[in-house]
Amino acid sequence: MKSKENIYSLKILGLFLLVIIILVLIFLGCYVENKGVYIFPGDSVEQMYQFYLGGWERIHAGTLSQFDWSLGVGGNIMAYVYYFLTSPFFYITLFFPREGMQYLMLNLNSLKIFLLFISTYYWASKITGNKNSKIIASFIITFSGWVFFYYAYNMFLDAFILYPLILGLTEEYLKNNKYVALTCCIGILGIINYYFLYMFLPFLCVYALIRYVNVNQLGFNFKLMIKVGLKFAGIILLGICLSAVILLPCGFLVMQNNRFMTNEISYFDTIGINEIVYFFSTLFTPVFERFNASYLIPEHTHEFIGWGGGCSLFAFIIKPLLLPLVFCLKDKYKRNSLVISYCMLLLLLNFQYGWYLLQRSIDTRWLYMFLFVDALALIEINEELEDKRLNSRKLIFSFMISGSVIAVLLLNMLYHHYWPRKQMIEVGVVSVLMIIFMMCYVVYYNSRKKETWFLLTILTLEAIASGRIFVAYNYGIDHTFFEQPEQSTEAIEYIKRIDHGYYRILYGSESYQIPGAPGAFVITTPNEPFSKNYPGFSFYNTIYNTETSDYYNRTSPNWFVSEAMGRNKIYNLLSAKYWITYDYESQIPDDYELLYKDKDTGFSIYKNPYFLELGKTYDKTINKEFFDSLPVLLKDRIMLDYLVTEESTNFEYELNDNFIFLGQLPECSTRELVLEDPISNGNLYVVNYGVTEIIISLYNDNELLKVYPYSQYNYVDLRIDDNMEVNRIVVEGGNYSGVAAFMDVYFEPNDGSYDQWYQQTQKEKFENVLFNNDYIAADINLTDERYIFTSIPYDKGWKVYVNGEKVPYEKVNLGFIGLRLGSGNYHLEFRYEIPYLKVGAIISLGSLMILILLSMRNSK
C-alpha cells in the first residue's frame, strides 16, 4: 500500500516538475537574451514594478506609514495596499537588493503560475479521481488565455491562485462539511485583493449551488436550497469579516472613487455581432498580443469591450474540440447544470450592465468564470469518453466543425487584410498548429488504450506553444533600461541626509533610448516619487485621495497625474523645495539655484528660493463655487492671494500681479502671434485648453531662439530669459478635443512683484516644523485673525490640534487642510489615522474568535 502511495507521490512530483520545465522553456529567451528581465512597457513598469520598488524602499527604510506622501500630493496608503503590502510574493523581494528587483519580476510571476497549477490540480482532485481529467483541468486554466492576457498584472495573479483553491475547499465543505479552511481562504483573498474577492463571490455562490445539486444528485427543492444557501452565505460572510481590517478602509476609498461608482451603461445595453464574433474567435488561438487577444479578429474591428479589446476565452484547442459533446453527456444532472451555467454566462456576456455589476467597470476580467466551467465540462466529457459512455467518433465531426471555423476566420482575415503579410502568415502557421493539436487529441480519444503520457505530451506541447507565442509577440523592456543611473535613489538619499523637514520634490523628465527601439523610454514616469519614496506631486493609480481631485483635474485625468512643466507658483504654494535632474538642465524651474552636483552618478539638485514650508496665511477668501467657474490660469493667479473655501461669501477678486495680454492665437494646427514690441525677462503663458500636445517655438524675427514641447492641459508657461528678445511665437499642435481652442497668450515681466509677495508670506510663517509622515507639528505667531492654509492634503483621517485641543478644519484651495485662527501664538499638530482601520481590525479579530469557537465546537 505504501509502495503505491509512494509511486503516486512521485508521479505527482514528476507532473509538477514538468510544469517547471514548461515555464523555463516558455521564458527561456528572456533569460538568454535579456538577462531574465521580462517587464512590459506601460502599466507593467509604471505601476507593478515601481510599486514593488516603493514598497521595498519603505520596508527597508522603516518609513511605511498610514499616510503616504508619494500618492500625488499625498494619500491613504490603503490606495496601494494590494499592489505590494498584502501580496505574499512582495515580501520575497525584501531578501534581495533593490537593484535586483527587475530580475525578480519574471521569477515571481513564474512561481505564481506554478502555484496556480498546484491549486487547480487540488481543486480538480476534489471533483474527480480520474488522473487525466485532473491534468486537463490544470493545464487549460494554468496556461489559459486569461492568465497570459493579464500576465503583466502582479496583483491579478496573486489573487487568481486562490480561486481554484477556494473552489476545492468548497467541494470539501459540500462533501464533508469542513468549512474552517474555506472561511480562512475567503478572508485571505479579501486581504490580498479585495477587488478580486468582490469579483469572485457571485461566481462562488452559483458554483456552490450547482455543485451541491450534482454532488447530492438532487432535483429542485426550494426549501432545501434556501437552507443550504443561507448556511453557505454565513460562511462567506464570516470570511469577509475576517478581512474587514483591509476591506473597510479600502471600501471607504473605493466608495469615493468616481471610476468605480459612476456608470454610463444602461440595463439593456448589449454587445454587437462584431463583439460576439471577436470573443468566439479567441477560442481558437492563444493570446498573441496583450493588447489584442485574437489576431483572427483584430481589436480595431469592434466596439470597446474592455482593456486591450476584451479578454481571451482560450483554454487550449481541446476546449472547442470537446465542448460540443457537453450536450451528449449521459449524466443528466451534470449535463443540465453545465448547459445552464453556459447559458447564464452567455447571457451575462451579452448584457454589459452585468459586467459593471461584477467589476464596477466595463472590462472582461470576469471571463475567468468561463475557465472554471470549461474545466468542469472537460472533466466530465473526458471521463465519459474514457469510460466509453460517449462515442469518441463524435470528435471527428467536432474536429471538422472546429477546423472549418478556423478556416473561415483565416479567410476572413485574408479578405480584409487585417495584418501585414508576415503577420498573416504567422497567424496561419499558428492556426495550422492548432489543427494539428486537435488531430492529436482526436487520435488519443479514438485509440484503444488511452495512454496518459500521450495526452500529457500534447498538453505540454500546446502549453509551450501558447506561452512561446505570447512571449514572442510581447517584448520586454531591454535590461539596460533598468541599469541607467536615473533609476538609482542616490539623489533622494542625499536630500534626506541633509533635510528632515517638510517639503516636496520635483524631478526632471528623464528618458533612455534603448538600442533598436523606435523611441526613447521615459524613466521618470508619474510613479517616480513612490518608487523612490519621496514626497512629490505625480502619481498613476486608480485609487487615490479623491478629496484632492479638484486640484488634480487642473492638469490631467485625476488618476494619472504627471508632473506639469511650469506651474511653479502653484508648486511653490504646495511646498516644493527641490528639483532633481540628470540631463535636462533646460527644464530648471524658475529661479531654482544649484545646491549639489554629483560627479560620479551625474545628478544635480536645485533648491527653491521661494520655498513655503507647510503653507501660508491668508487675510482674504473667495467662494469655491464662483471660483470653479473661472479659467484655470486665472484660478492659479487668484489662489496666491485668496483662500478658496466653500463657506466664503466673497465673489470678487483683485489681482496683484502684472499680467499683460499679448493676443489670441487662431484655431488651426500651426498658430502664430507676431508682437510689435519684443518681450524679454519674464514668463510667457499660453492657454491651450484641451490641446494637450503642443510645441512652442520662440523667434526673434526668423531666428529660432528656443523650442518647448509640452503635453498638458489648460495652460503652459515658460521662462523667457533676459538675454532673449522674442517678437514671434509659434504654437504647433492638432486640436482633437472637438471644441475650438482660440489660445490666449499672456506675458508676466519679472519686475520683482513676486519677490514682494514672497517676502510678505514670510512675516507670518510656520516655525519649528516637525514632520514624521503621520504626524506634523508646527508653531505660528499671528498678529491678527488669519485663515491658515496648509499644503497637507485634505483627508478625513487627519485630526488637527491647536494648543492641545482638537479643532475642526475644512477643505480649502481645491483639496487641502485649512482653518481659521485669531491673533496669538499657536502650536499646531496634525495626526493621521486610516479611516475605519481600527473598526475593521476589531471586526476581523471578532470574526477570528467566532471561527475558532465554531471549530472547537465541531471538533468535540
Image: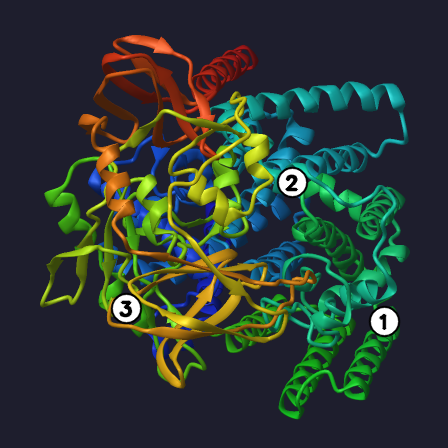
Tell me which corner region of the image, top left, top right, bottom left or bottom right, holds residue 148: bottom right
Tell me which corner region of the image, top left, top right, bottom left or bottom right, holds residue 218: top right
Tell me which corner region of the image, top left, top right, bottom left or bottom right, holds residue 514: bottom left
Q: Indicate the position of residue 849 as horizontal and vertical percent values.
A: 47, 13
Callout 3: helix, strand or loop? helix
What residue do we see at 23% from left, 30% from top?
772
CA separation, marks 2 and 3? 48 Å
Q: Indicate the position of residue 125 as horizontal and vertical percent values.
A: 61, 46
Q: Amino acid at mark 2?
A: Met
Looking at the image, is mark 2 or mark 3 earlier in the sequence? Answer: 2
CA separation, marks 1 and 2? 33 Å
Looking at the image, is mark 3 or mark 1 earlier in the sequence? Answer: 1
Decide: marks 1, 2 in contact (CB < 8 A)?
no
Looking at the image, is mark 1 or mark 2 earlier in the sequence? Answer: 2
Q: Which residue is mark 3?
A: 586
Q: Tell me the tag on residue 51.
A: none
Q: Which residue is mark 1?
A: 398
Q: Which residue is mark 2?
A: 199
